Image (cartoon, grey):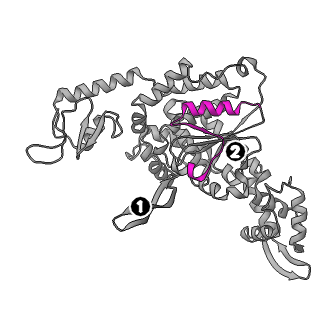
Amino acid sequence: MEKQETEEDLIDLMTCKNCINLISEGGKIYCKEHPTADFVDSDTGESRYEYEETQLDSHCSTWEKKVEKGYTIKELYVGIKEILKEFVDTSEPNREIITLWILGTWMHKDFETYPYLFINAMKGSGKTRLLKLIKELSWQGDLLASLSEAVLFRTTGTLCIDEFEGVSGKDKNALRELLNTAYKKGGKVKRMRKKKSVDGEEQVVEEFSTFRPVVMANIRGMEEVLGDRCIPIILEKSDNKSITRKIENFDSHPKMLEIKENLINTNFWCSLVKCSCCKTMYIEWNKYISTPIYTTHNTTYNYTHIHLFKKIDKTGIDGRNLELSFPLLILAEEIGIIDDVIEILKNIIAEKKEEDMMEGRDVMLMSYVSKQEKNMWHKIKEILTVFGSGIAYDSDENHWLNSKWIGQALRRLNLIINKRRTGQGVEVILNIDKAKDKMKIFNPETKDEKKPISN
């Protein structure tokens, strides 16, 4: 074995720069297994890891033994799902998605986006118990009864928020704005703080990242925009006494303690990042989508990735739904359950689109307009009255519904052909044909399916 290894070569041999045995001090890299090794070439002064062949071999074999003793990702997946099955009565697809989501929290920083999990359940359905389980098994999990802006960006780890009913209230605008961006890498919050200096006190800018795993639970349902960033999980009330009568002994449950120890202490996560190439998967996917004709002779891609990309492409999932699904699909491929997870996510997305069809504000308004008569003047106040009568109105939830919103929404959606102001208010001629065309996008029965790229 040659000793002309570069820093990157060495780091690669040691799994990755996140390896728990590597430390950096004083511009030198050390291995905890061999603390006498340093990172300076005594002849040239250039940075290089000096090691003896036996030391490197010993380190590698030691690392392999640790991995061998620890759980594989498949074993972690099966173990977590078994615990969920023991304490929570829900469907198998729900358990699969929740388990993948928990695993993903341990490496969410390597993804460009990470979906929120939303648990919707009536009282007594076990949502709080499920939140406690997710908190125990997720990366730095914390269970809260409420959430403030400061907690969101000044802390780290997985947030599990119970009884999250008031998120759509007027007083939660700032929090909603933060949450609407925190599912995606790059979201920042800047705050001023006082700092002592030789001239006294000065104001300095502190910057915080908002990107983190978040799971929310409530009874009433999720606010529309925030819900678009969530994977929904619906829990039904259970009459299975063998589950509902179990005591939540999460702190002493042998299997849970064993899994938690493996999740926290193993080298598995930095290994998974390398095996899955999460940091390059997004670039490769975009290249794949941009290539009209693809052959496996193109060395830019790994064959395993192509296998995954083709399956994702055939689903037709796109936009934000693809952003949210991508991390779970990468994990599912690594575990070997990609086909099952694709079907589950397709069903979830189809249900979300159907719900958007029924509940989305703009979609509801387009649906209303598409059913009106052409080439006639419609009063905005009458549109508000008739349109509003078709909504289960709640003054807190639907404070947005007024004449101003109707007028702005019609303009934003380009549904106004002509407009005039009369003694009785504003009147408009509606673009009925455009509304009908737009409704085809949201109606599953009339939407043209996206054809996958021919490979």
Q: Note whether residue 16 is visible.
A: yes
Q: Position of residue 265 (x, y in %)?
A: 42, 29
Q: Is residue 148 left or right of residue 279?
A: right
Mark nearer the viewer, 2 or 1: 1
Amino acid type, callout 1: Lys
Residue, x 55% and y 45% (percent of image)? Answer: 114
In this view of the protein, which residue sits in the foreground, 22 or 174?
A: 174
- Give above or below for 132 relative to 222: above
Residue, x 38% and y 25% (percent of image)? Answer: 67
In this view of the protein, which residue sits in the foreground, 413 or 151?
A: 151
Q: Position of residue 89 (x, y in %)?
A: 71, 25
Disc on res. 6 = none
Identify residue for label 1. 195
Secondary structure type for disc 1: strand
Disc on res. 164 = 2
Span highlighted in magenta in the image: 124-151
- Give above or below for 329 relative to 428: above
Secondary structure type for disc 2: loop
408 magenta-colored: no
- For mark 1, does the 10 Å Cα neighbourhood hold few (<14), some (14 to 19), or many (20 or more) residues? few
Q: Is residue 205 left or right of residue 214?
A: left
- Give above or below for 92 relative to 425: above
